[in-house]
Amino acid sequence: MNLPLKIARRYLFAKKSTNAINIITGVSVLGIAIQVAAFTLVLSVFNGFEDLLLSLFSNFNPEVKVEPAKGKMMEIDSITCKN
């Protein structure tokens, strides 16, 4: 077992007196737990947005697009709409 893990285990499972190391450890564990929960929530929300946006824009931006490799092509600027 490496030294940092041994030291961390010693102070994490030490007697529960109110010394600075136990308070710092508790604050650190609580902070990391809150960060992990927030990160999980943000990723879940963005995953939902991705599904929503893919369903909305799948008609405009298809997964497979057929284009000629070479030959005649029409430029978008050459098409004019006259009303």
Image (spheres, rainbow, N blue to C red):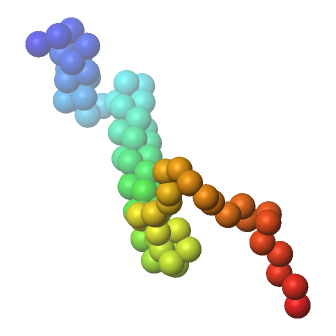
- Where residue 69 appears, x then y in whole percent? 49, 51
**Which residue is outermost to the top?**
3
Front-most of residues 78 and 38: 78
Q: Is residue 75 above or below residue 35?
A: below
Q: Is residue 10 left or right of residue 75?
A: left
Residue drawn at x 51%, y 78% is 59
Q: Is residue 53 visible?
A: no
Q: Is residue 43 left or right of residue 81?
A: left
* Quadrant of the rendered image containing residue 73: bottom right
Left or right: 5, with 54 as reference point = left
Which quadrant, please, contains the C terminus?
A: bottom right
Residue 32 or 46: which is nearer the viewer?
A: 46
Q: Quadrant of the N terminus?
A: top left
Pick out the residue farthest to the bottom. Answer: 83
Q: Residue 60 appears in which quarter of the rendering?
A: bottom right
Which residue is at a point 46% across and 63% down the rendered structure image? 65
